[in-house]
Amino acid sequence: MRRSIAPMLSALALCCLASAVRADYQVVYDQGPSTGLESGAFHSITGGENFSDSFQFNADTTVNGLNYFTNIDLSTRAGDGDFRVRFASDPSLPGPVGSITGTQGYTSFESIGHGLYRMHFEVGAITFIAGQKWFAGVSGNGFDAGALGIESPGDGQMAQFSGDTFQGMQPVGDLMFQLTVGPIPEPGSATLFAGGALVLALVVARRRRSAVPARASLSPTDER
């Protein structure tokens, strides 16, 4: 399961990383390096072992970006199809059902010190409904994107997958990531998520008609 056990970072070093935040977006959900100690490093391969983690908001919140952290230098992996960014309403649902998935490159890659790197991905704007649990994950298409775990900020568990097949919740810490809102993304990245958003909207509508409480819903605000 673990790719390697990364050296534990001191609390002081982690706090220092918090200052390295870009000014063109706002972090609205934070499981970044400053929120706890690193719990380990894990594979993150789209067709192999990969992980996602749960999140929810206390109020309806629009997101159009994701920060992903790794200890692998992926500065040469900037192609449009290099990464998969996935939001899922329920990790046990097969494939694209109940999920929004984009295959894309990052919009920025930067070293934030202490052997860590941050990638920023732009996505089509999604409004997450208050109190509804979602899962977020990033994986490399044909290579290891190197997920990092972090102690304390969440429930201490990540959803483990083999490809798209859910393997269960693993008590290995929380996924190190942040959700952001900022300038509306370029048309290309927004379009990647439009189809998934429509699929998920249909799934949610069907659940509501059958009187089964929806696990999550969204309202895409940019369907260019």
Image (cartoon, rainbow, N blue to C red):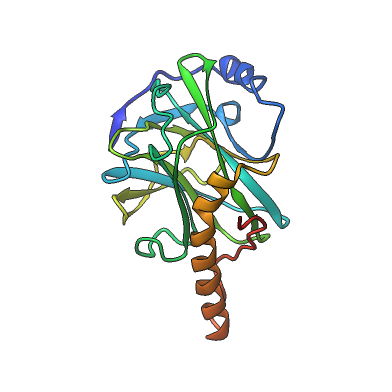
Q: Foreground: 59 or 83?
A: 83
- Counting the numbered discs, the total is 0
Q: Is residue 119 left or right of residue 2?
A: right
With 62 as the anchor, is 124 left or right in this view?
A: left
Q: Is residue 163 above or below residue 106?
A: below
Q: Residue at x 61, y 53 (%)?
A: 56
Q: Residue at x 54, y 61 (%)?
A: 197
Q: Is residue 111 above or below residue 126?
A: above
Q: Residue at the far bottom: name it.
A: 210
Residue 159, given in percent of the width and then of the height, sits at 40, 50
Question: x, y (%) of residue 169?
Answer: 38, 51
Q: Is residue 149 above or below residue 21?
A: below
At horizontal 42% and vertical 66% (from top left) the residue drawn is 97
- Viewer-proximal residue, 44 or 158? 44
Q: At which x and y percent is residue 40?
A: 39, 29
Quarter occupied by the C terminus? bottom right
186 or 199, which lies in front?
186
Question: Which residue shows up at 65% across the image and 63% down it?
Answer: 219
Say whether residue 152 is visible: no
Q: Quadrant of the N terminus?
A: top left
In the image, residue 181 lies at what x, y percent? 68, 42
Instruction: Note whether residue 11 is visible.
Output: yes
Please identify the quarter of the rendering in which residue 60 is found: bottom right
- Is 75 positioned to the left or the right of 206 in the image? left
